[in-house]
Image (cartoon, rainbow, N blue to C red):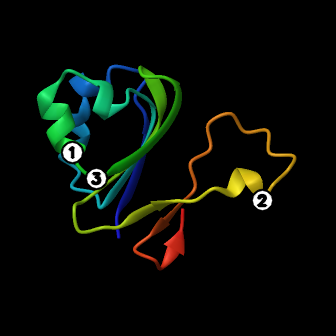
Amino acid sequence: MKIVTWNCNGAFRKKFDRIAKLNADIYVIQECENPIESKHKEYQNWAGNYIWNGDTKNKGLAIFAKPEITLKKLNWSNEFKNHKVKHFLPCEINGQFNL
């Protein structure tokens, strides 16, 4: 499984095609906009399978995966009472491992 991470520094809708060429199974992207709130149709189509967390619609943390990969968002913040990480997005991949 190929996992790529990148801090895109915003405007990921204008940059996703560059990273998509890496053909990863999973992309962890920091500082990206929420695809569901974007008006960019190509970005929304590319981001068909994802989970996202952020303070505003324009800047958050996302995990994107190929369509055949199952992403399940995990609610670990309730388990860790002293959790101080602002953007934390744990998830389960295909029911096999946690990311």
As measured in the structure, the alpha-carbon distance from the residue carrying label 1 to the one carrying label 2 is 34 Å
Q: Position of residue 10 (x, y in %)?
A: 40, 20
Figure check: 93 above or below 43: below
Circle 1: element type: helix
Circle 3: element type: loop
Q: Amino acid at mark 1?
A: Ala
Between 16 and 55, the one nearer to me in the picture: 55
Q: Amino acid at mark 3?
A: Asn
* Location of mark 3 (residue): 49
Q: Amino acid at mark 2?
A: Glu
As measured in the structure, the alpha-carbon distance from the residue carrying label 2 to the one carrying label 3 is 26 Å
50 left or right of 61 in image: left
Q: Which badge, 1 or 3, is on the more N-terminal residue?
A: 1
Q: Residue at x 56, y 48 (%)?
A: 89
Figure check: 53 above or below 14: below
> Depth-wise, is mark 1 or mark 2 nearer the camera?
2
14 left or right of 1 in image: left
Disc 1 + disc 2, Cβ < 8 Å = no
Figure check: 32 above or below 39: below
Circle 2: element type: loop
76 left or right of 18 in image: right
> Depth-wise, is mark 1 or mark 3 nearer the camera?
3
Between 37 and 59, the one nearer to me in the picture: 37
Work out which quarter of the rendered image holds the C terminus and state it.
Answer: bottom right
Write down the quadrant of residue 37 in the picture.
Answer: top left
> Given the current orientation, which residue lies at the most extreme right position?
82
Q: Which badge, 1 or 2, is on the more N-terminal residue?
A: 1
Q: Residue at x 17, y 24 (%)?
A: 40
* Location of mark 1 (residue): 20
* Location of mark 2 (residue): 79
Write down the quadrant of residue 98 in the picture.
Answer: bottom right
